Amino acid sequence: MIGCFDSGLGGLTVLARIRQLLPTADVVFFADQAHVPYGDRPHAELLELLRKNLAWLDAQGVDAIVMACNTSCAVAERYGWPVARAPILDLIESAAMAVERGEFRRVGVVATAATVGAGSYGRTLRARISGIDVVEVPAPALVPLVESGTIQGPIARAAVAEVCAHLPLDLDALIYGCTHYPVLEPHFAEILGDGVTLVDPAIVQAQRAAELLADASAGNGRTTFVTSGDDRAFRSSVNRMMSALPTMLATR
């Protein structure tokens, strides 16, 4: 069984990628919505939340923990990963692998304020790829939009345009440093144009999960959804997001 967690709905983009490659695997998806958004919280608090979330997934007996929360990965990269029984797949490491494969040299990262503040994307990319130029830009307004279902229309586009205005004009690629952001891809693509490759780390993250769990992926294809927040609202939001994701996945 695969364990997967995020602060909220953004992790469903990782889940969707996992389902493409491991349709029969059983997955438990945990959304820590009682504390969403993570991006505004102090690092010490985020590290404690990460410890508790990993321990909860371990207690479910998962074979691996596939991270779907960039902010948690950023904090762990800076301060160290809490001890866990199950192996952990780091989403930022997957992003670096995707950039390396694409041979990109000037890369932007849009992420939560906590992720940008940790500096983890820049350190990870520079350690892996010599001479790469990395620009990290915080996008605190985007997670609340996605959580509320505001992913289309002028409000969402304006929010994405505001973020993109802080990016250099000569980027090779832009990394979604938060799993909420890929659902806003039509806006990013329209604003940035064809010259900038949009990198969704969830794609490589799912590939790594499939390789790690090749011999342990057989199951009933069941997904168990758990939230620390309002369960009824969560179920409604999951249904809304999952119905929108096939269109997004079809573009990659």
Image (spheres, rainbow, N blue to C red):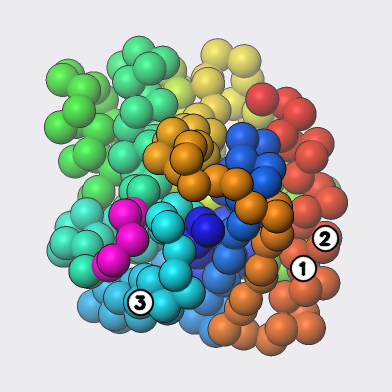
Contact, mark 2 vs mark 1 (Cβ under 8 Å): yes
**Which residue appears at 82% of the width and 60% of the height?**
240
Q: Quadrant of residue 38?
A: bottom left
Is residue 249 among what the camera can see? yes
Give the residue drawn at x 66%, y 70%. Answer: 225
Secondary structure mostly seen in magenta is: loop
Disc nearer the start of the sequence (3/1): 3
Circle 3: residue type: Ala
Instruction: Name the kind of residue labelled 2 in the image.
Output: Arg
Going 55% across and 46% down the picture, which residue do you hit? 217
Q: Is 210 placed left or right of 44 in the picture? A: right
Q: Which residue is mark 3?
A: 55
**Spatial separation of the CA atoms under disc 3 and disc 1:** 25 Å
Residue 237, image x and y in percent? 77, 68
Q: Amino acid at mark 1?
A: Ser
* SS for callout 3: helix
Q: Nearer the viewer, residue 210 or 201?
A: 210
Q: Label 1, on which residue?
A: 237
Q: Which residues are magenta?
A: 84-88
Residue 240: give its label: 2
Disc 2 + disc 3, Cβ < 8 Å: no
Q: Is residue 66 left or right of residue 203?
A: left
As drawn, is 125 to the left or to the right of 235? left
Residue 192: x %, y % from top left: 59, 26
| Secondary-structure class at tag 1 | helix
| Mark pair 2, 1: CA separation | 5 Å
